């Protein structure tokens, strides 16, 4: 079975949704036959400096009051903690994730994408460190085992892996994804947004059952 997951590291629902999917997958009988591929998605491709406080930036982006955005942050924190995830409220900054997505594709080519994604999520939501400046990105990549010289070369070249990111985003548009997290199983079953573990379990079982049936000799 082939599972594609579109995420943005700046998205709290992706942080939580990833954990819930992985919990369902861990309990899935056929988990060893499931290939998971992570795809890029930018919630705000026009974001710039990476220094604006997250509460103010997201409230402005979606037309909410500051109190409304704080309430959403607190709800996200509660949902994250229910999954055993650390989540600090309000201290993050907002910025452009395109370079991080490029770096995640480089990490994928080196077999370390999942490790870099997990660390980036932790740094952003649990540690509230910036994931937008070059030095932090380089240090995270090196921490998961990537070569520093290669990492810095990728970050210095704005075109490196850029088309990989754009291709993922075009595919998300083709599939009608208006936001993330967005899960696609065997190119037939979609799960969008923050969903319970039980829904992932049901979808995995359905996709496996129907995929196995379609592969039987007629």
Image: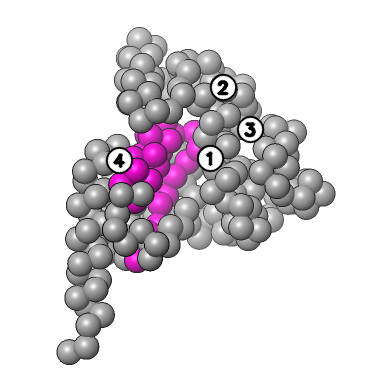
**Quadrant holding the C terminus:** bottom left
Q: Which residues are magenta?
A: 1-25
| Residue bearing mark 1 | 118
In this view, 168 is above or below 63: below
* In this rendering, the label closer to the viewer, 3 or 2: 2
| First-in-chain label (1 vs 4) | 1
Spatial separation of the CA atoms under disc 2 and disc 1: 14 Å
Q: Secondary structure at mark 2?
A: loop
Spatial separation of the CA atoms under disc 4 and disc 3: 24 Å
Q: Secondary structure at mark 3?
A: loop
| Residue bearing mark 4 | 193
* In this rendering, the label closer to the viewer, 2 or 1: 1
Mark 1 residue crowding within 10 angstroms, few (<14) / some (14–19) / many (20+): some
| Residue bearing mark 2 | 128
Q: Is residue 13 magenta?
A: yes
Mark number for residue 194? Answer: none
In depth, the one of 34 and 79 nearer the eye is 34
* In this rendering, the label closer to the viewer, 1 or 3: 1
Spatial separation of the CA atoms under disc 1 and disc 3: 16 Å
């Amino acid at each position: 079975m082939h599972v594609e997951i579109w995420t943005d590291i700046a998205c709290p629902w992706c942080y939580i949704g990833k954990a819930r999917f992985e919990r369902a997958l861990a309990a899935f009988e056929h988990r060893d036959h499931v290939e998971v591929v992570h795809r890029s998605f930018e919630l705000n491709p026009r974001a710039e400096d990476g220094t604006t406080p997250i509460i103010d930036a997201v409230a402005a982006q979606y037309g909410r009051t500051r109190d409304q955005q704080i309430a959403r942050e607190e709800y996200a924190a509660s949902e994250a903690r229910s999954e055993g995830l650390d989540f600090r409220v309000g201290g993050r900054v907002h910025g452009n994730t395109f370079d991080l997505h490029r770096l995640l594709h480089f990490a994928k080519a080196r077999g370390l994408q999942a490790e870099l994604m997990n660390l980036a999520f932790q740094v952003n939501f649990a540690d509230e460190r910036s994931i937008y400046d070059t030095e932090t990105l380089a240090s995270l990549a090196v921490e998961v085992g990537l070569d520093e010289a290669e990492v810095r070369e990728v970050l210095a070249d704005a075109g490196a892996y850029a088309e990989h990111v754009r291709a993922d985003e075009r595919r998300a548009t083709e599939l009608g994804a208006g936001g993330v997290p967005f899960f696609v199983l065997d190119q037939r079953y979609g799960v969008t947004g923050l969903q319970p573990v039980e829904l992932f379990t049901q979808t995995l079982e359905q996709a496996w059952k129907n995929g196995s049936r379609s592969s039987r000799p007629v």
